[in-house]
Amino acid sequence: MQLLPGFRDFYPEDCARRNYTLSVWREVAARYGFLEYDGPVLEPIELYKKKSGGELLGQLFDFVDKGERHVALRPEMTPTLARMVAARERDFKKPLKWFCAPSFFRYEKQQRGRLREFLQLNCDILGDASPGADAELLALVIDLLRTFGFGPQDFVVRLSDRDAWMQFALGRGVPQERLLDFLGVIDKLERTQEAESRRKLEEFGVELEAVRAFIADPSAEAAKLQGIMADLKARGLAEYVAVDLTIVRGLAYYTGLVFEVFDRNGKERALAGGGRYDALLEVMSDGKVKMPALGFGMGDVVLANMIEEVPAAKARRDAWIASRNAAEVYVVVAEESRRTEALGVVQTLREAGWRTDYALSAAKVGKQFQVAETLGAKFAVVIGAEWPEVKVKDLATREERLVAAENVATLGRA
Ligand code: HAM
């Protein structure tokens, strides 16, 4: 039986890597005061038809359930989050700073950086329309990547503004109801053949040259984003950000500021993307709740590729995994007749919180020491002729001392 395309098995080494990613995501989000939430894996398909739009609609894993409901596995979090917050808006102090890091599903063509089931960290700020909130969110995305061990030479946050594109399009006669289709063409510009882009833009009466000239001069946009840049500069984070009008984002709900994060080598697809969606809660609540909002999603797939490519990030990850996986203490049963006593010692050590391992069946003493080394144990506790004392050996310094078995949990250090 084969795996379905775009899905993954997680062997222990894969789980360890996933746990590392989740632990950095959670730690940095908490550092910024974000609270964790979650929603259902399955939602009515209407939620995405109405709210996500764009190419996501062609990528839904959807089916009709036994109660005749047309449902979809979640391809993203933002519509669910908007629904949840709109439903209980009065219960929360503003601004809300919330994050989640579950699995999402998209029926995409499997390629480097894109799978059909992936993890995505979502961080969103709701109830604050100020540039201070924009900068806070950008600082978070930057600090996440710095914590993984990436520097300004490894990634860049490309900052843009959908408003600017809407003005551009409306000023050239693109009708309001076709704006999203027009933005879709701009979104794919970098990934589409020139002749194809030219043809598509002509359908809107817009020349490719005009689009290119607009992208080539982001000065007006840079002036508009000055407040955000000043904020990031105050935090020493400005070098990670560049104004870049090629970014418009493929989802329907974005209203103003939008951004995407890329590796500097241009080898990977986007690592993270987000922006403002100031009108989504209002649409979601039939006009009842008006709340500005912004956020981003960061996937685990491109992130894992980048960690493999950047030695500093890889070393940090591997050290974390090694420190988590290693046994701290290995109990060596030097005399098999003392196995009962050895089991008591194992239990005492584990109850005291030491990650403890031992041979489940009789094995030569040399072999047991070998296993202790392989497992990365710091101490061996040898149960043998010295009983009721045990020998505690520091496996790095080779130092040994005798400790009364009842005090074994101190490992002779108290
Ligand atoms: P998105 O740009 O569709 O945005 O996804 C954000 C990130 O999720 C991407 O940059 C990528 O790292 C990861 N991602 C997306 N699709 C896949 C896939 N098929 N395989 C692997 N990784 C993938 C959103 O989803 C927005 N809801 C983000 C957001 C939150 N906007 C505001 N708040």
Image (cartoon, grey):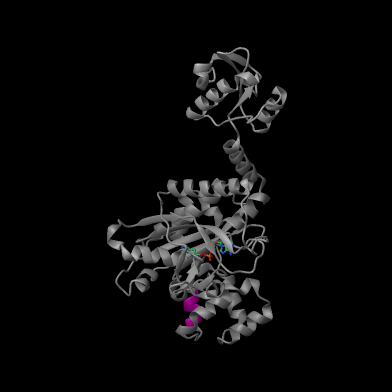
Tell me which residue sits at (49%, 55%) in the image. Answer: 101
Q: Is residue 400 above or below residue 261?
A: above
Q: Position of residue 263 (x, y in %)?
A: 62, 57
Q: Position of residue 345 (x, y in %)?
A: 54, 23
Q: Is residue 371 magenta?
A: no
Q: Would residue 26 be found to the left or right of residue 128 on screen? A: right
Q: Quadrant of residue 382?
A: top right
Q: Is residue 166 magenta?
A: yes
Say how many tags the image has.
0
Q: Position of residue 104 (x, y in %)?
A: 52, 62
- Residue 364 visible in rendering: yes
Residue that sits furthest to the left in the current view = 90
Q: Position of residue 310 (x, y in %)?
A: 66, 49
Instruction: Compare residues 228 and 72 and report the one nearer the observer.
Output: 72
Q: Is residue 340 above or below residue 160?
A: above
Q: Is residue 62 above or below residue 380?
A: below
Instruction: Compare residues 117 and 68 and report the one nearer the observer.
Output: 68
**Range drawn in magenta:** 165-170
- Residue 250 visible in rendering: no
Tell me which residue sits at (33%, 66%) in the image. Answer: 86
